[in-house]
Image (cartoon, grey):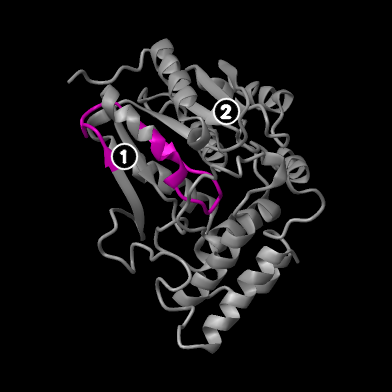
Amino acid sequence: MDIKRLAALVVVLGLGAGCLDPGDPGNLVPKTVTEDPTLPRMEISGTILHAERFGDPGAPTVIALHGGPGGDYRGMLPLRALADDGYQVVFFDNRGAGLSQRHDKGIYTYSLYLDDLRQVVDQVTPAGQPFVFIGHSWGAMYATWFINEHGDYGGRLRGAILSDPGAFTKKQLDDYIKRLYGSVSVVREQFNDALWAGQFMSAGDHARADYLALTMALDGAPAEHRDPNNLAPFWRDGAVVAAALFDLADRNGFDWTTHLKEYQHKVLFLRSDLDTSRPLWYQQELASSYADADVVTIPGVGHEMIWERPAEYLADARDYFGTIGFAGVSP
């Protein structure tokens, strides 16, 4: 165990032995939307999501999908600048992730999680507004899962920017995890066994689990080559939902490429050239699952390219929107 993880355990044990209860909201990690009524939110079936919108609600919409699973959208907030181009820009923390409401591990299913994204799309793009996804890491996988299931959603989903996706099939995921972590995965094995062997957790248990997940993920995996002097910020990890989705993948497998060739709109893969877990050849392999996809590399940056190099990222996004004819509303 490294010194950072040891320190995390000491903090948890020390709080529990002292006057502060680590299970009380806000002591270990930021409060969720169910604990802090001032947080911006969105309600969908069976849960409350931490969410924000910027720009004209009636404009063509950019839906940002954060990494993880279990992460939050804080490091994607430079994309707010697209609101000044005449788009509505929507951010939300996935169910059980970031600052969204927490749930027991046993509720999570593939159908539930995919339908969450459909409900978000329908709520933020009423009356058939066109939209695109910008998905980062896990978010790029989430967007691909939606496209494989729903295609262009009745002509409304005009495109997608996929940044450093990890995998579109179970086989790809297993190979990618080996490149990312090597032979050890604290999230999927030791951490999972230690913190949520049972199906039911109190709010305090979620706080403890999320805190330990946060300390283990602070700097990311070495293969991602994040900038230590400009680490992407985040609020809170969702440890239980991350474990639940990995467990679903292990038990059931997945293949989100079965209908991707039917999606006829151009897709842009934006990749970081320093992330050795997602090399160029691999992003090209993933891109080949689509009928029409370009792979563009942002040089000299690691996995957190949206936060570390927002100007270049936004320039590539704007060029792509021009290519596919996805224009914002003029003021």
Does the magenta segment cover residue 73?
Answer: yes
Q: Which residue is mark 2?
A: 259
Residue kind at label 2, given as amino acid type: His
Residue 279 quadrant: top right
Instruction: Give percent across and percent down for residue 266.
Output: 50, 16
Q: Is residue 68 magenta?
A: yes
Residue 55 sits in which quadrant? top left
Helix, strand or loop for disc 1 = helix
The residue lying toward the viewer, choosing from 103 and 1, is 1
Q: x and y percent of residue 207 in the render? A: 49, 70
Residue annotated with mark 1 = 122
Coordinates of residue 178 in the picture (x, y in percent): 78, 45
| Element assignment for label 2 | loop
Q: Nearer the viewer, residue 14 or 64?
A: 14
**First in residue order: circle 2 vs circle 1:** 1
In this view of the protein, which residue sits in the foreground, 12 or 246? Answer: 12
Depicted 230 relative to depicted 86: above or below: below
Q: Position of residue 218 (x, y in %)?
A: 59, 54
Q: Residues within 10 Å of mark 2 (few under 14, many from 20)?
A: some
25, above or below 301, in the image: below
In the image, taking residue 21 as reference, residue 46 lies left or right, namely left
Q: Is residue 167 above or below residue 218?
A: above
Residue 61 seen in render? no
Q: Residue furthest left?
A: 331
- Give the vertical position of 155 relative to 175 (above or below): above
Q: Residue furthest right?
A: 183
Q: Disc 2 vs disc 1: which is toward the camera?
A: 1
Give the residues drawn in magenta, as a range.
53-78
Is residue 286 visible to us here? yes
